[in-house]
Amino acid sequence: MKGALLVAGTTSDAGKSVVVAGLCRMLARRGIRVAPFKAQNMSNNSVVTLDGGEIGRAQALQARACGLEPSVRFNPVLLKPGSDRRSQLVVRGKAVDTVGAKDYFRHRQALRSIVAEELASLRAEFDVVICEGAGSPAEINLRATDLANMGLARAADLPVVVVGDIDRGGVLAHLFGTVAILEPEDQQLISGFIINKFRGDVDLLKPGLDQLAELTGRPTLGVIPFAEELWIDAEDSLGTIADAPVGRPRPPLRGDWLTVAAIRLPRISNSTDVEALACEPGVAVRWVTDPSRLAGADLVVLPGSKSTVSDLEWLRRTGIADALTARAATGGPILGICGGYQMLARTIDDRIESAAGTVEGLGLLDLEIEFDDPKVLRRSEGTAGPVPVHGYEIHHGRVRATGDRPWLHLNGTPEGSVRGPIWGTHLHGALESDEFRRSWLREVAAHANRPDFLVADDVSVADIRNQQLDLLADLMEKHLDQDALERLITRGAPVDLPTLTVHQ
């Protein structure tokens, strides 16, 4: 098999990322050399690559599905929103600018060349490249600057399949409308549809799919059923819903549950950090935006943020800051990660991200933070006492002074802070270190007065992630038309597909 395919979606979070990951795993299990590619991503969930850059976390998961280490080649352009109007522009893994929609126009030609170069390089090296679109290809107001959807498909002559999430409703209209609104040259590459997250009897859906094929001249290549087990590695903030549980909580091994309130910040980044906790039996993790939700929790997690000073102000405005201060006064466990760690400081001097200068932090740690360039991007490993820990760092904030003892030692250097039952670190992914997570959860349970909570000794986050990738591949193999997919990958879009017109 030799070729490429673009997986687009009717909306954000329609299932593009999981379909790409599933296809990559399915092909890799057959011995096909396959790589993922997302020309442009917009997400604050990112990871550090072996080549010292950062890419969207979904592309790192897709690389894992292929049996590859994450690389900036798989996601050459990343936009990290810091506000409703401005995003940090990351090109080939490095932050190069902060842009608004209009500023982005001056970068488009250079970015288009970079995207074309990276895709051509991957296609020369691998048998198959499975590309993921961004948002929806039907955003015709953005077509002129499009790098990831039909702009990429047209430039590289890629067949396109469109994924629709039937769980949201209106999927047949979404699929029809996505094709119909495109210009004729773009329509010629839309080669089929995939229905995602279906519940119920597929025979009841079949007449609608038949009519969709008659109306568009394009087949539905498969209907993927809703799978409760799929939840780890959420693509973006759409997966972090206030008051929603994280994952599928399993009963405790004995006695008490351990409850975790994860604060759903407006500009949350690397929200996936808490997913490792949700893998543990007896640990119930829930996203919260209301200070009342903190009172009964055994642990509160203040996660990363792409806009630390702005999100700190939101904590104060909502009353969560006061609830955290009251919690600390009574010895309630708190964990701050990256931006959340910085918010726990006495002061934050930020002349980089927000240009706010020096502001007061929550003062729960004896810590002074100063933002500086360049951004820290590194994979790190070390210990917490005798226990090994590893992860990655993505931050502008530096610790300029601290009176607290360090929590970790990374690459031979003290890192993080501990003050009683309050912990903080810049290290993302630390909780995926199984032995470290178990040891720390025992401390949390002791501080939370949960003596009957039993930490499992056999949970492996890496194994759970691999199991989910294999489940995705199983779903692709069982529910998608394999022959049709192979034809698209190897031969491209069918010729003379009908053009739809929108009647006015």
Image (cartoon, grey):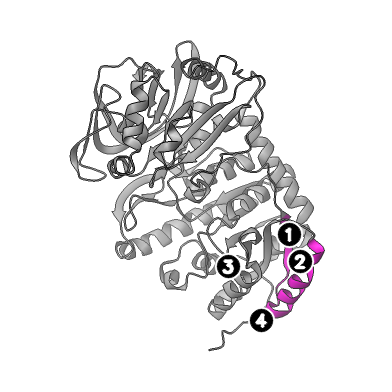
Looking at the rendered structure, the secondary structure element under dot 3 is loop
Vertical arrangement, residue 287 with respect to residue 450, above or below: below
Query: Dot 1 corresponds to which residue?
Result: 223
Looking at the rendered structure, the secondary structure element under dot 1 is strand
Which span of residues is magenta-colored? Answer: 202-224
- Asked if labels 4 and 2 touch by Cβ distance under 8 angstroms, the answer is no
Query: Dot 2 corresponds to which residue?
Result: 205
Residue 220 counted in the magenta span: yes
Mark 1 residue type: Val
- The image position of residue 302, as x and y in percent, is 40, 34
Neighbor class of circle 1 (other Cα within 10 Å; few <14, some 14-19, many 20+) is many
- Please tell me which of labels 1 and 3 falls first in the chain: 3
- Please tell me which of labels 1 and 2 falls first in the chain: 2
The residue depicted at 27 percent of the width and 28 percent of the height is: 345
Query: Dot 3 corresponds to which residue?
Result: 157
- Please tell me which of labels 3 and 2 falls first in the chain: 3
Query: Dot 4 corresponds to which residue?
Result: 498
Residue furthest to the top: 386
- Asked if labels 3 and 4 touch by Cβ distance under 8 angstroms, the answer is no
Query: In the image, is 62 to the left or to the right of 394?
Result: right
89 or 408: nearer the viewer = 408
